[in-house]
Image (cartoon, coloured by chain):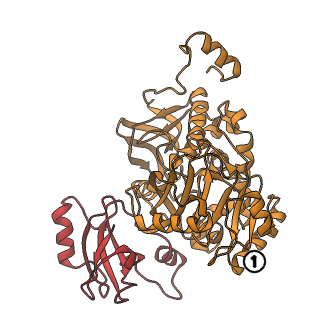
Amino acid sequence: MRRYSAFAIAREALRHHTGWERAWRSPEPKPRYDVIIVGAGGHGLATAYYLGKNHGIRNVAVIEKGWLGGGNTGRNTTIIRSNYLQDPSAAIYEKARSLYETLSQDLNYNVMFSPRGVMMLAQTEHEIRGYQRTAHANALQGVDTTFISPSRVKELCPIINIDGPRYPVLGALWQPRGGTARHDAVAWGYARACSDMGMDILQQTEVTGVRREGGRVVGVDTTRGPIDCGKLGIVVAGHSGVMAERAGFRLPIESVALQALVSEPIKPVMDVVVMANTVHGYMSQSDKGEMVIGGGADGYNNYTQRGSFHHVEETVRALVETFPMISRLKMLRWWGGIVDMTGDRSPILSKTPVEGIFVNCGWGTGGFKAIPGSGWAMAELMAKGHSPLTEGFSLDRFREGRFVDESVAAGVAH
Amino acid sequence: MLTLTCPCCGISACETELAPGGEAHLKRFGPGSPDADFESYLFLRQNSRGVHFERWRHAMGCGKWFLAARDTATLEVFGTYSAQTTEPPADIIAAIRAKRPDWSPA
């Protein structure tokens, strides 16, 4: 793989850009791999990458039924933060956030990580108490957050109306090291690095069955024929239930649609991410100038990658109250993704009832922020059989009642 | 927009008038049951891509619970029926079979 650099740009400029290589290979499947990962989204590709980088396991295939990064990796609102309440969450989300800081250098691919700061508005007395509690918990966990005053909110984001009639801004939980990154670039960067390590990324290949012998996985059936494997990682987000059924077990997951939209591009008006969880909306401005807006998830099971219009209407209505200057912006694009919700709103990174099969799912409405940490932890789990980062997130926790309750930090807004 | 007919009051209601209540026909377990049964009742879900039986409440109407059969991959509604039943009635099964010949109940 030729490295990307300022020198490479100069070199290619002189020869009419004829020397750029394809970022990753599109190989024919081999008959057997040590590890197969199902799902070439951010989490699947990151798992493969850290299997190779941290554990030396490079005979790996990542199988994707659509195209690389075409699911929720390309459908989120790119927000990165780690201001969760419980210790297991803080550990894995903060690991992810800190890996994002050096991800561009690590992958030699510009993921445009922008630590512009994430602000979660407190608009009721209960939210003030809740976020103050989170700030104290984060202080003990080593996550840099503070509870700030309304005047500081106004200073950091002048377009907010802090004196709204129904929900005035009473303060905010502020994580200055949170921010955004380019979501597609995260998937592409990991894919390029995986391909460079000799891993095969098989796009347009659907896993149609999981082959087991004596309670152990031995391979998968795909639309391009059967492939043997030593271990299997299922990292397919919204379709986790479908894959689990093929592998012969059930998951505590329900799949629902979560929507987002962007406005037409405008000049820079805000350089922080603002989340308003009481009124159900969050907004940031992309580098192109579009206002990136997200809101609540639908309440019913859905696999169609489109959601209900009234949720978008509610989100926009709430944000117009909070940011009056956006009231006349036109909407440019609107899309939905299928998110995998667990009962405690925390992910599952775990062994399964079938030996050799591991699942990484249940990230629900907020998986993008966790991609590097999730891949790091999942790779360790698959390579060694245990990882300190995944201990709290096993499948057993639902049977044993050891929930990692993040419904406040993760229930609605991301 | 999803529209369901409430079998209790007969009104054809759009989803803003309804509250979703999750998977239908769950087998409930009480005190003294093993952990695995509680887990399946409280957390494990079919979450099928395709035919799905689910609970709804006509929250902004008559307020009653009812059940619906719906396709989660196409949003097609096969029918709604009373919540006072432990399994889908024959006419709902027939309506699903008519449109999904290869479907079999889980």
Q: Amino acid at mark 1?
A: Arg
Relative to residue A320, is residue B44 drawn left or right?
A: left
Q: Residue at x 51, y 58 (%)?
A: A328
- Chain identifier, colour orange: A
Q: With respect to residue A126, does A362 lie above or below?
A: above
Q: Residue at x 53, y 47 (%)?
A: A73
Q: Nearer the viewer, residue A159 or A373?
A: A159
Residue, far top = A15
Q: Quadrant of residue A146?
A: bottom right
Can the viewer see residue A405? Answer: no
Q: Quadrant of residue B35?
A: bottom right
| Image quarter of the C terminus of chain A | bottom right
Q: Residue at x 30, y 59 (%)?
A: B74
Number of marks in picture: 1
Secondary structure at numbered mark 1? helix
Q: Nearer the viewer, residue A312 or A330?
A: A330
User: Which x, y percent locates residue A54?
Assistant: 70, 38
Relative to residue A90, is residue B80 drawn left or right?
A: left
User: Which x, y percent locates residue B55?
Assistant: 37, 78
- The chain to which mark 1 is attached is A
User: Which x, y percent locates residue A155?
Assistant: 78, 60
Relative to residue B87, is residue A389 drawn left or right?
A: right
- Chain identifier, colour red: B
Q: Residue at x 72, y 67 (%)?
A: A86
Can the viewer see residue A206? Answer: yes
Local crowd size for mark 1, using a 10 Å CA cut-off: few (<14), some (14–19), many (≥20): few
Q: Please name the residue that numbered disc 1 is placed on.
A: A129
